[in-house]
Amino acid sequence: MNYSDRPLRIKIFLFAALFALSASLYAHHAVAPNFDLAKEVILTDAVLTEFKFVNPHVYLYVNVPDDQGATAEWRCEMAAASRLKRRGWTVGSLLPGQVISIAGSPGLRESNVCHVDTITLADGSILSEFAGRPSAEEVFDGLVSVADSQSRLAYLPNGQRNLSGPWVTTQQSLNMPIVEPTTEGEQAGIGLVRHFDSPALSCQPTNIIYDWIFERESNDIYQQDDKITLKYGYLDQQRTIFLNQTEHPLDLSPSVTGHSIGWWEGEVLVVDTIGFLPGVLSYVGRSGFTMHSDQWHVMERFVVSGDGRMLTRTYTFDDPLYMHGSYTLQDSASLTTEPYVPYGCEDLGGENNVRPVAN
């Protein structure tokens, strides 16, 4: 469609030199591979037909009129619902039937698709996914108070240290080690790019290390005598740690979560996990991947603080096929009053977010 030849209420402007606001430009860097940031698209008098408040991306569906009385259907992408929630958005922030204007960037591989910069409502107020980032104080809202933690059972009736309940990370950044890959490990990541190949884009978990601490979703721990269940708030991953097994079965079916056996060393829960499907370990910058093979082996040690408010996980992993050496890191989560909720992932990206087929 050649927009310059039609009197539509849809305009696209070259603005590479003008698009210099640092915060907006930084935020756009992550979407650059799927949208043309050298152009601006403006959809005026757009009628909202659907507001899909889902992960990994929120989508607005609108009908945009032209001066001839016809309409064009558009799909416009925003950040993940989980991120927008922390900036004050809700499923009711936009309602079908509203007349809005959208300013953003057009899709690279699909027509009538855009990424949203701002939304102007009928009363002139402006909404943006880049506004309303939580302050450092707000990050800690919803955490269990000292007084409430003191009334919490330190030990369960079965004698286990009480790790149960919802936990949320309060770390400011995701700590993942820089791995020295073997030749095979390097080969496994060649050609993979995050905006096409991230498992999360198709609502698939990444791995048991990365997903536990990524985003600020409440994870849930449920303890029983013979097993402990970990429910991840990010991408709804679920693991079972078997406490009544001393060895892994010989006929394991490989999976993203692997097979975990655990035991208590005093008040420390020790977990040994093998039996993984080959997959993503972490992301390098905005594009590259560090991979793990089916020989990936992870050891975790979960320790709850004396006041019951902090859960620290120390983990060590190795992969003789894809990595040189072993790697040890630590992360932490705080007991929260925010319960675990399903992640609500739905891939609606369409052709624009799919790797183009080489001719």
Image (cartoon, grey):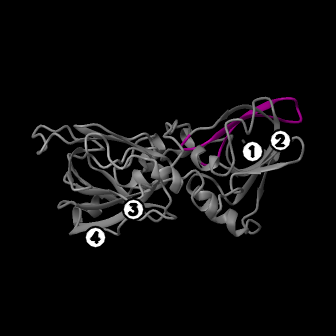
Amino acid found under the numbered disc labelled 3: Asp
In-front residue for pair 328/352: 328
Compute the Cα span from label 1 to label 3: 51 Å
In-front residue for pair 2/45: 45
Q: Which residue is mark 3?
A: 331
Q: Secondary structure at mark 3?
A: strand
Q: Which residue is mark 1?
A: 2
Looking at marks 4 and 2 on the same chain, the residue that comes earlier in the sequence is marked by 2
Residue 288 in percent (x, y) is at 41, 62
Compute the Cα span from label 4 to label 1: 49 Å
Residue 308 in the magenta stretch? The answer is no
- Disc 3 residue crowd, few under 14, some 14–19, many 20+, Cα 10 Å: some
Q: Secondary structure at mark 4?
A: loop
Amino acid found under the numbered disc labelled 4: Glu
Q: Which disc number belongs to residue 180?
A: 4
Residue 29: tell me if it is visible: yes
